[in-house]
Image: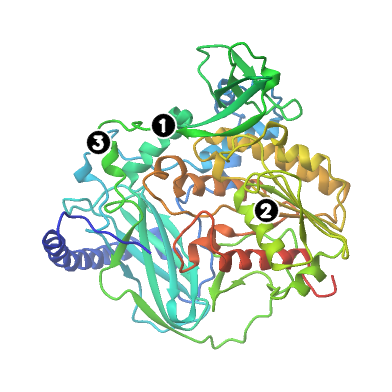
Amino acid sequence: MYTGVRGNSNMDEQATRKNTKVGRFLIVALLALALVFLNMQHIKFKQFSISGAKSVWIRYPAPKNYSTLLQEVKMPKTEWIHKLMQYGYQNHSFTLEERTEGTVLMKMIEWPMPPDPIVPFRKSSDPLHTCFIILNSEKTFHVGDQLQVMLRMFDFDGNPKQYGGDYLQARIHTPELKAGSAGTVIDNQNGYYYINFTLSWPGKVQVSLSLIHPSEGIEVLKRLREERSDRVYLKSTFKAGAISKTTVCNLILTPTKPLCNFTDLRTGEPWFCYKPENLPCSTRINHAVGGYLTDILIGEERLFFQSKVNIKKPILPCAMGYIIVEPSPQPTTVLDECVQGKPMLSPSGFYYKDQWMSLTCNIRRFNTPAKVTECLRRKKVHLFGDSTLRQWFEYLTKFVPGIRWFDLGNPIKAGPLCALDMQNNIMLEYCAHGPPIQFTTLSSQHLYYISNKLNEIKGGKDTVICIAICAHFCSFPVEVYIRRLQHIRRSVLHLLSRNPDTVVVIKTANVRALTQDVILNYSDWFSFQLDLLMRRMFAGINVAFVDAWEMTMAHYLPHNIHPPQVIIKNEIDVFLSHVCPSEKR
C-alpha cells in the first residue's frame, strides 16, 4: 500500500536503513526504560491496561470529553460565530444551544501545537527514525482482548521529540483471512503515543502504523484552512442569448468588484460569485469546480509534505510486529438486530474474509438482487450528499436489474439521478448537496441544500434517507461545516418528529489516497476532524450510522476516496441491515 523511501539512490537507502537499524536497538532500550519510568510514576496510561479490560478507548487527540467541555462553558462564547459573520452569515439567527455547542465543538477538536511557531525540518517527525513496540507481547492473547502498541516519535537527527500533535493511522490485519480492524490513537502530547486495538479474530495478527502528517505539517494545514479557503475555487457560467461569461465563485470572495449574492433564502447558507460584466446575476446557468491555487506554501513548509518522506509513511516495528491470537474461551455473543439510535463505538467493527462484522449489531448479507429487492419493496430511498453516496446509487442500479435508471437528462457524475422498480414500487433518488461542492458542471437549478430537501419529505416507515457530507468542506473553515450540520440536524429532528418511523442513516467520511495534488486541500486530517464533529453532532439522535471511515481504513486495499466494489458492497449491507434488520421487515 505504501511505497517509496527517502534517498537519491539504492546506496543511500541501504546506508540510511543500516543506520536506522542501529537506531532501532537504541529506541527499544529507550522505550523499555520509559516503560519502567512510567510504571514507577504511575502514569495515566496504566488505566488502559489490556488484561481483561473493556474496550473504552478514547479518540485521539484525546481532548476533554464533550460533557466536560460543556460544563466548562459558563457563558456561550461566540468567537466561532464572529468568524461566520465574516463569511456571509450576518443574517443567521443562532439559538443559545447552537452558540454554546459551536464553542464546545471548536474546543473539542483543538489540536496540539508545536511549542515553537517555526520548527526546522530536521527537528520535525521522522517515521524512519521511529518504531513501535507491542506492549505485553509475551502474554497469551485471546479474541476479545485489547492490544496496545506504544511508540515515541523521533526527529530527523535521531532525537526523541518532546511534544505530540502528529497524525497517525493504524490497523491490525491478517492478510490470509482478509481480516482487518482500525485502531485508536492516544496522543500523550510528550512524544509518546499509544495505539489501542480490539482483537476480533484468531490467528497471526499484524500491526500496521503510518505517519500521515507530522505535527509541523498539521500546523500548515491549520493555517491554510483558516487563511486560504480560496485555494479551491469554483466557477459559474452566466448566459443570455449569445453572450456567455464565466466568473469565480466561493463562500468568501474579496469584494474587488461587484458580487452576485446566491445565499439560499431558506437556510441562509451564503454563496457568492463575481458579477459578470453586462450580464445580470439571474443569468447564472451552472456550477463547477474551477481549479486549485498553487504556490500557497511559505518558506520550508513544503518540506513537511513529501510523499516519500513524511506523508502517509509506514512506521516499522522495533522488534516483532505481530502477535498470535487464540480463540476466545468464552461463548460467542449473539448480537441484536441493527436499529437506529445506537451509539457508534470505536472500533465499530472489523473485516473477516472480506465481510464487515459489526461489534454492535448483526449485519445481514444482501448477496442476491432478490434480497435487496425484498428489503426495498414499497420504499422511497433518498441519497443526499457527495459522490461517495452516488457510488451507492450506481451499485444498487447495477446489482439489482429491476431497479432501472430513469433518465432525467442530467450528467451521471453530478445528478440528480433517479431509478425506479415499478413492479415492486421502489424509488431510488440521488441528489448532490449544495455548495461548496467540487463537481464537474451541474445546473445551478440543481444546487440543493440537504436541509431543504428533508423539509420537503413527509417521511414514514417506507421512507429511507441517507446523508453523507464531508469531503467538499475540507478546504473551508470548520465553523462553516458546523453551521451546515446544525441546519441538517434540525431538519432531521423535524422529520423524525413528523414521522418517527422514518429511517435516517448517516454515512461517515472516507479515507483517501494522499497524492501530491490533493494533500493541501483534502488531507485525511481535514476529514478526520470533520468526521469527529459529525459523529458528535448526531450522537443521541434516532439515526443509524455506516462507519465508512473505519470500513475504508481497515481494508487491505489502498485508500481511495471512491473505494472499490468490495467495500461499497459491505457499506450497502450495513445500510440495508438498518433498513431491514430482520427478514420480516
Q: Image check: 320 left or right of 520?
A: left
Residue 545 in view: no
Q: Position of residue 16 (x, y in %)?
A: 14, 60
* Residue at disc 1, secondary structure: loop
Disc ID at residue 334:
none
Q: Which of 12 and 517 is in front in this view?
A: 517
Tag in front: 2 or 1? 1
Disc ID at residue 506:
2
The residue wearing badge 3 is 300
Q: Position of residue 10 (x, y in %)?
A: 15, 62
Q: Which three-letter amino acid code belongs to the residue tagged 2?
A: Ile
Q: Position of residue 482 (x, y in %)?
A: 61, 37
State the residue at coordinates (36%, 77%). Answer: 322
Q: Which colour scheme is used?
A: rainbow
Question: In this rendering, is residue 251 above or below 576?
Answer: above
Q: Which three-letter amino acid code belongs to the residue tagged 3?
A: Glu
Could you tell me which quadrant the C terminus lies in?
bottom right
First-in-chain label (2 vs 1): 1
The residue wearing badge 1 is 293
Q: Are marks 2 and 3 in contact (CB under 8 Å)?
A: no
